[in-house]
Image (spheres, rainbow, N blue to C red):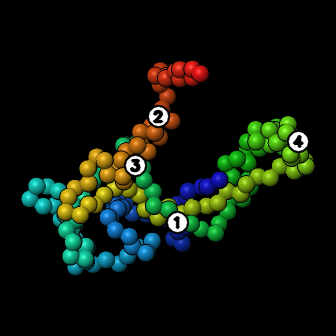
Amino acid sequence: MLSIQPPISKSSSAPSIPKLTPNILPCRINHSGPVNASKRYWNVEDDEKGRKMAYFRGRKLLGREVKLSDSYRGAVICDTDRVLPLSDSPNASDFDAKAPTTAKSTVEDDEGEGGDDGEDDIEPTKVLEEVATFDEILVWGHEQVPGEDDVFVRGVQEWLGFAEAMHSVGEKTTAVAPATP
């Protein structure tokens, strides 16, 4: 299990989490972390048609903004070595040693492949630190704005639609027709 938390602040005030815009570039870069890019190397401007434009290593890039819906917030997270104590873990309050085990364990018991040795292992909750937030992503294309069929544009939009369907509460229900042989 994972827990996203604000960074640990050495001052008494609450840490300020910056807001930024992630950029998905149409190239492979063998680096995954912050870059101290100057305006000389990365300067996003609006062109005469109001599109986002930048040059990267001499190549003209045009960008498309993909906005997150108002009900979502993007987070840039950083892996830490910290683990929540068992008492602070979200699953600790729900854990009951006498409760039945998971369905997977039950199936294994029925098949005779595994047995309950009396010890239920609780997975530790690993802490991820929130470094920044965002409400839009810029997807870049070589000399053209990425279309609706761009894999990254479509991926973000499909994920948002799927998440909305999973977490929405409404009267709309869809019935699945039984398969016919």
Q: Which residue is the site of mark 2?
A: 165
SS assignment at label 2 = helix
Q: Give the residue type that dot 2 points to.
A: Ala
* Near-viewer residue (61 or 129): 61
- Quick check: 54 above or below 36? above
Q: Is residue 85 left or right of residue 141?
A: right
- The numbered disc on residue 112 is 4
Q: CA distance from mark 4 to mark 1?
A: 42 Å
SS assignment at label 4 = loop
Q: CA distance from mark 2 to mark 4?
A: 38 Å
Can you tell which of label 3 and label 2 is closer to the viewer?
3
Can you tell which of label 4 and label 1 is closer to the viewer?
4
Q: Residue 9: percent from the left, percent from the top?
A: 53, 68
Can you tell which of label 3 and label 1 is closer to the viewer?
3
Q: CA distance from mark 3 to mark 2?
A: 15 Å
What is the crowding at mark 4: few (fewer than 14 residues within 10 Å), some, or many (at least 20)? few
Q: Give the residue type that dot 1 points to.
A: Cys
* Residue shown at the point (71%, 57%) measured from the top left: 124
Can you tell which of label 4 and label 3 is closer to the viewer?
4
Say if mark 2 contacts mark 4, CB within 8 Å.
no
Say if mark 4 contacts mark 3, CB within 8 Å.
no
Q: Which residue is the site of mark 3?
A: 155
Say if mark 2 contacts mark 1, CB within 8 Å.
no
Q: Give the residue type that dot 4 points to.
A: Gly
- Please tell me which of labels 2 and 4 falls first in the chain: 4
SS assignment at label 1 = strand
Q: CA distance from mark 2 to mark 1?
A: 28 Å
* Near-viewer residue (127 or 146): 146
